Amino acid sequence: MTMNIKDPEVHRLAHALARRRGVSATRAVREALEETLAADRSRRRGVAARLLDLQRRSTADPAPVLVDADLYDEHGLPR
């Protein structure tokens, strides 16, 4: 597969990263893409876990429902 990237800034960034890491530009781009995908997967798993936790907590034992008898004493006065 061939990928033809025509953006000079992308080339500059790829070569700068390659020099910094001491690898080829291809390897630098590959590693950067792999790291970005891994971070994205991790972030999405975190969001999913938080949503599941929120769902569990929201469907757990609900707060007791108050009825009129709970709000007033035997004389009809507010508690």
Image (cartoon, rainbow, N blue to C red):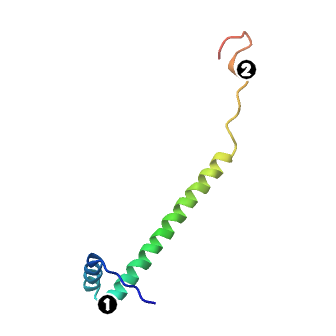
Instruction: Please tell me the numbered disc located at residue 68.
Output: 2
> Would you place residue 72 above or below residue 2 in this image?
above
Q: Is residue 46 above or below residue 62?
A: below
Q: Looking at the rendering, which quadrant does residue 48 occupy?
A: bottom right
Q: Is residue 1 left or right of residue 48?
A: left
Horizontal side of 11 relative to 1 (left or right) equals left
Would you say 45 lies left or right of 15 here? right
| Residue 45 location (% of width, % of height) | 54, 65
Q: Amino acid at mark 2?
A: Asp
x, y percent for residue 43: 48, 65
Q: Nearer the viewer, mark 2 or mark 1?
A: 1
User: Which residue sits at x=42%, y=89%?
Assistant: 2
Task: Count residues near mark 1 (Cα–Cα under 10 Å), then give few for <14, some for 14-19, many for 20+.
Answer: some
Q: Nearer the viewer, residue 39 or 59?
A: 39
Task: Indicate the amino acid at tag 1.
Answer: Ser
Q: Quadrant of residue 18?
A: bottom left
Callout 2 environment at 10 Å: few (<14), some (14 to 19), or many (20+)?
few
Q: Which residue is mark 1?
A: 24
Q: Residue furthest top?
A: 75
Q: Where 33 falls versus 52 (above or below)?
A: below
Looking at the image, is mark 2 or mark 1 earlier in the sequence?
A: 1
Instruction: Using residue 74 as the reference point, say whether residue 48 is left or right of it.
Output: left
**Percent x, y of residue 29:** 36, 82
Nearer to us in this view, 1 or 39: 1
SS assignment at label 1: loop
Which element carries disc 2, helix, strand or loop? Answer: helix
Residue drawn at x 37%, y 84% is 4
Gap in angstroms between the C-alphas marked 2 and 1:
75 Å
| Residue drawn at the location 45% of the way across and 70% of the way down | 39
x%, y% of residue 60?
68, 47
Q: Depth check: 30 or 5 in front?
A: 5
